[in-house]
Amino acid sequence: MSKLYQKDIISLVPDNSRVLDLGCAKGDLLYNLKKFKHIHAVGVDISTENVCQSISKGISTIQGNIDEGLSFYDDKSFDVVILSQTLQVVRNPLKLLQELLRIGKMAIIIVPNFGHWRLRSQIFFKGRMPKNKTLQYEWYNTPNIHLASIKDFEDLFAKNDINILEKKLYLSNGSPLKWHWAGNLLSEIALFVIKK
């Protein structure tokens, strides 16, 4: 995760809040949120190695597959639910978004933009499925099963009465994109703060 948008996530999370990070990896974001925002942190990750590393940082971490649901969490049991670079790998993104917004008062999601100009040009000029720093896999072994652009995400939110409270767009080097009107073409990563 880019340090630039990790700083943005930290700035968006209220002090002393209850935060759930789905797909928390090694717990680095939750560790920094605990350090700077004094949050109550819970992480979920599918990887045994990631769970162990997260626990070693003092993070309450559960090994689990979020594709199997989040029904064990009560409604609004978290102030913030974070989903970073994970929505595109789950079987049912809409169902997961609905669950995020059921268990959290708000959600912060970070997604790759498959509408980025470099990805488009790789298909157009090379006739091959695109790869970049964010999307490093070959087409046959990628965990990314839902390829969506920023406009696709915005349409999904609108059709399902999900409010976008804030949107931040990032270039391939992790720096913020200033021209939101060209976000679908120029940004490689999008951060959305959403609420039902």
Image (cartoon, rainbow, N blue to C red):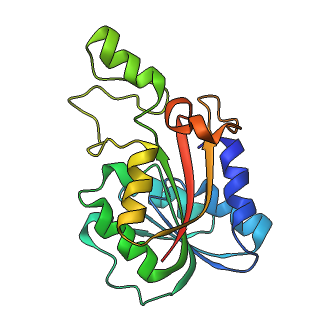
Measured as percent of width and height from the top left, residue 43 is found at: 50, 68
Question: Compared to 17, does 5 lie above or below?
Answer: above
Residue at 54% x, 46% y: name it: 190
Q: Residue 5, position in %: x, y?
A: 66, 47
Residue extending farthest to the left is: 140
Residue 85 in picture, x, y percent from top left: 46, 49
Residue 86 in the figure: left or right of residue 133: left
Q: Quadrant of the N terminus?
A: top right
**Image quarter for residue 101?**
bottom left
Front one among 10 and 155: 155
Q: Nearer the viewer, residue 73 or 114?
A: 114
Q: Position of residue 3 (x, y in %)?
A: 69, 43
Residue 32 seen from this side: no
Q: Residue at x 29, y 56 (%)?
A: 90
Q: Does 17 appear above or below 136?
A: below
Nearest the eye: 54 or 153: 153
Horizontally, is 124 left or right of 75 in the view?
left
Viewer can see residue 148: yes
Which residue is situated farthest in the front direction here?
A: 181
Residue at position x 50%, y 37% in the image: 184
- Residues 17 and 125: in front is 125
